[in-house]
Amino acid sequence: MSEGTTRIEPALGDAARHLSSAQLEAGFHALPPAPKDVGRLTHIVRRPTKDTREILTRARLSPEEGLPGDNWSRKPAPNPTEQLTVMQTGVAELIANGQSLALFGDNLFTDLDLSVTNLPIGSRLRVGAAVVEVTPMPHDGCSKFNARFGSDALRFVNAKPTRHLNLRGIYWRVIEAGEIEVGSPVQVLSRTGT
């Protein structure tokens, strides 16, 4: 069990907070550029069941369990390329429009640039004391994303012209176990071309 403060939240969105395509585009262009080499971890979220979230202040990542207690490790045959879901904090905050970032269902949020150019498949990063690797699994918006954030947000994250920016996020798998906590540095160790 991870140490830290936890809070369980429902996985339901507020339709009154859905942004239009124009609002999302304008907000995205107003975001400051995310760091490319060293960022920080801003949120850790565990999904004990499909519809619940626990917001953690710290955890221990492992190659066997990913984020211990998360529903990924409870699957009959968990796919290592889907071990940890990660999203860029600024993009998530824009789309959430005041709602909790736990609604996304992602495990980790960072202020680091998650684009394909900055973090190609196979890139390795140190997150706190853990080492993770970018996997080839695409992270796309789905019907649950649409219900939580609206159809304009779904089109925004899946749009072909900006797909390389990974606005919906990416997947990591744990290479070396280690402790992480909110505020931990997220440092690129190596970048590998696809």
Image (cartoon, rainbow, N blue to C red):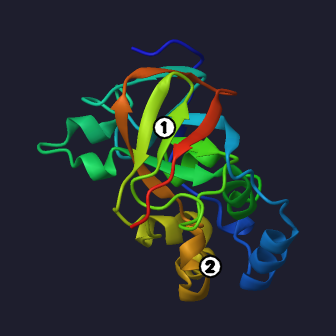
Which of the 4 image quadrants contains residue 187?
A: top right
From the viewer's perspective, tell me whether residue 85 is left or right of residue 137.
right
Residues at badges 2 and 1 in contact (C-beta under 8 Å)?
Answer: no
- The span from disc 2 to disc 1 (Cα, nearest Å) is 24 Å
Q: Residue at x 65, y 67 (%)?
A: 15
Give the quarter of the image for residue 93: bottom right
From this viewpoint, is residue 7 visible? yes
Residue 49's place in the image compared with 19, above or below, is above
Q: Amino acid at mark 1?
A: Arg
Q: Residue at x 69, y 60 (%)?
A: 91
In the rendered view of the protein, which quadrant contains the N terminus? top left
- On residue 156, the disc is 2
Which of these two is toward me, 139 or 63? 63
Q: Is residue 85 above or below residue 142?
A: above
Q: Quadrant of the C terminus?
A: bottom left
The relative height of residue 87 versus residue 71 in the rendered view (above or below) is below
Q: Classify mark 1: helix, strand or loop.
A: strand
Q: Position of residue 20 (x, y in %)?
A: 74, 80
List the residue tagged with mark 1: 53
First along the sequence among labels 2 and 1: 1
Q: Amino acid at mark 2?
A: Phe
Q: Residue furthest left?
A: 76
Q: Residue shown at 54%/32% (left/top)? A: 127
In which image quadrant can residue 118 be found?
Answer: bottom right
Q: Is residue 154 visible?
A: no
